[in-house]
Structures are given as structure tokens and as C-alpha cells.
Amino acid sequence: MPVEFLGIGGTNDGSETHPRSGGVFDKDYTLRLARAHEEFGWDRVLFAYGSSGPDPAQAAAYVAAKLDKLQILLAHRPNVSYPTFAAKTFATLDQLSDGKLTVHFITGGSDHEQQREGDYLTKDERYSRTREYIQIVKRAWTSEEPFDHEGEHYRFADFVLDVRPVQQPRPDVSFGGSSPAAYAAGGAEADIFCLWGEPLAQTAEQIESVKAAAKAAGRTDVPRIQVAFRPIIAPTEELAWEKAHRTVDAIKARTSGGQQLTRRHSLTNPENTGSQRLLAVAAEGERFDRALWTPTAAATGGAGNSNALVGTPETVAQALLDYYDLGVDILSARGYDMLGDTIDFGRHVIPIVREEVAKRDAAKAASAREVLAVDG
């Protein structure tokens, strides 16, 4: 199966290791970073969502209007707009990008962060709302006739979109999470299910949970699986590990005295299951499998994509292939020096992974032909 690489559509140069050098929306940096992804072999970039940050849809539109090949993963929280309005925004952006849009729906893992924008639903209520929201957006994208809706969270009558997505029947829907409620919602509705990087054994368990949820929802297919990491690469293993320890030291320097790296995440007591899982893995040990390293997650309180893969490009590529062999076909990566690491990862890691995946696919195809020949 083909492999895809997802990077980050950052709007400034700040990261967990250093504060941004300019404004929160640096247009020149945003375009430079996106262009680096396009030029060095990445497939798409994520425009993330935060209550205090730039509107990701507009940042994505800015990039889409200036680049040719790079695809977009747009993060969206259902609490911030009505689903019919969101469906128009997404369809317009798919038009603007010539059919390069995927939408990532975020239920919200922090009550405090959700309440910043007036969302006081409980976590379970948020998952119920997200599921209904996705269903409405999908129908709005695909319905040629006006339709009514009366559900638990939304009610409207006689709605139809005039602006339609370029992609037919619709753009893909992406979803993430690590709780039973997340598996149930994403297993039912998502085309892509996103996980944070955990050891291989735990990742395999989560993939099975997603598959079981999809089957329970009556699906005959299953979502594609995406897993996210923070790569730390260098020409030698020794240099890579020196770089890894410098990275954690820089994170700890920023978080000394309990400083939060983001406005939406607690360093010590995260509410969301995904971050709790990352901290639990870190408590078990620092190194797992071929290259997974947990101190970066521990230092950030398991904030989002925070477990690292450390080593030479060859080591990190082989570690990513271990996940590919589990059934992961979308590999998400983001460095701590976003621009420099985007270039290095694209130049040195992506070609190795793509070459090895091509070899695996060719071997499987040859084996399948042999089986057909014997049966015939």
C-alpha cells in the first residue's frame, strides 16, 4: 500500500524548545515552511487549531493559493461554527486548493481550552456532537437536494450547498483519539484515524480497537491509520542522542517553574486519554523498540505529538517502517526546528521509507501473482 507523509503547517517558528521570533502569524515563514514540505517530498501539512491562534482555514487558503502540489489537512473544532457553515468553508477551500483538502475534526481534550470559546459540554457530550457534526458535513458535501436535520445537537431545514467540493464524492475526514469514545466515533465516521506515537505493541492494540469500532458501526471497510512522531536525526547515532538530550534540556528550561508550553495543556495533569497514555508509557521507560524515546513526551506533559524517534536517518526510517508493517500508511512527523528538520527529514528519511515500501509492495505483488499462477 502507498505511504504518505504529513508535516506541520506552522504559522511561526516557535516550538517547545524556543519561543517564536516574531508574530504568531508570520506570513513569510508560513509560506517558506510549506514550500519546504512541497519541495522535499512531503504529501500534506496540518494546519492546527488553538483557541488563541490564527484561523487555520485562512492560513491554509493562503498557502494553497501559492503552492501547486502540497495537500492540506485542516483541523477544525465543531464548537466554533455551525456544521452547515463549516461545510461551505471546507467546500470552498477544496475548490481553492483544487481538491487537496482533508478535514481533521477535533472533539477537544481539555475542558478549559474548550470553555475559552464558550463550549461547556462534557467530554462524552462533545464526542456525540462531533459524530453528528461529521454526519451533517458529509451529507452537505454529497446531497444534491435540500435536506432537513433534527438531531441531539443540531436542527435545520431545507439546506443544500451550492458550492461543492472538487473531490468526489467528498473530501476525506480525519479523526483522532485514544479513548473508547474516540474509537467509537472515529471508527464509525473517519476515513483516517490518527494516533500519537506509542510503542509498537500499544499501537497494534489501538489499531485493533479502531477496527473493532468500525465493525461495530456496521462498516465493511476500516479507517486508514496515521501515527505521529517527533524525529531527532543526525549523521551518527552518537550525534543523534546528543541532539536528543539537548532537545529535552531546552524543553525543560522553558517549562521550569511549571510554565506551560501551550495555553491548552497541563504539564502534570492532562485531561485527555492520549496524553495520559503517553505519560504512562514514559513512566515505564525511556526507550522502546528500535528508536522510540519518551523523555520529550514526559517533559511536555504528553502534549500532543511528543514521543521522539532518535537516530540516524537509516535508523529512524527503519523505525517508521516497523509501524508501516503494522498497517500504518500515513506517517506524521514534526521536528523541533520546524524548517530545518522538515528539510533534513525530507531529504534523508522520506526517500529511504518510500524505497523500502516500494520493495515491500513489489514483493507482495510478485507473491500474489505466484499464488494465482499455482491456483490457475
Image (cartoon, rainbow, N blue to C red):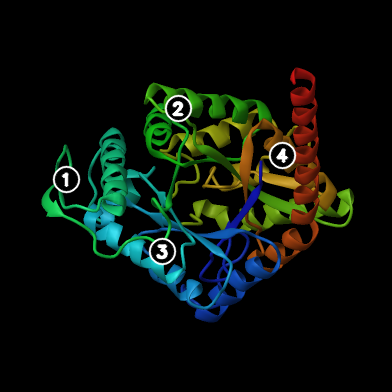
In the picture, residue 167 is in which quadrant?
bottom left
Give the residue at x 63% y 57%. 253
Give the residue at x 71% y 33%. 325
Whole-angstrom CA distance, mark 4 to mark 1, is: 43 Å
Whole-angstrom CA distance, mark 4 to mark 3, is: 36 Å
Q: Is residue 93 left or right of residue 140?
A: right
In the image as oriented, which residue stretches furthest toward the front?
376
Residue at disc 1, secondary structure: loop
In the image as oriented, which residue stretches furthest toward the top?
375
Sequence-wise, the earlier of marks 2 and 3 is: 3
Residue linked to disc 3: 94
Q: Amino acid at mark 4?
A: Leu
Sequence-wise, the earlier of marks 4 and 1 is: 1
Residue at disc 4, secondary structure: strand
Numbered disc in front, either 2 or 3: 2
Q: Amino acid at mark 3?
A: Asp
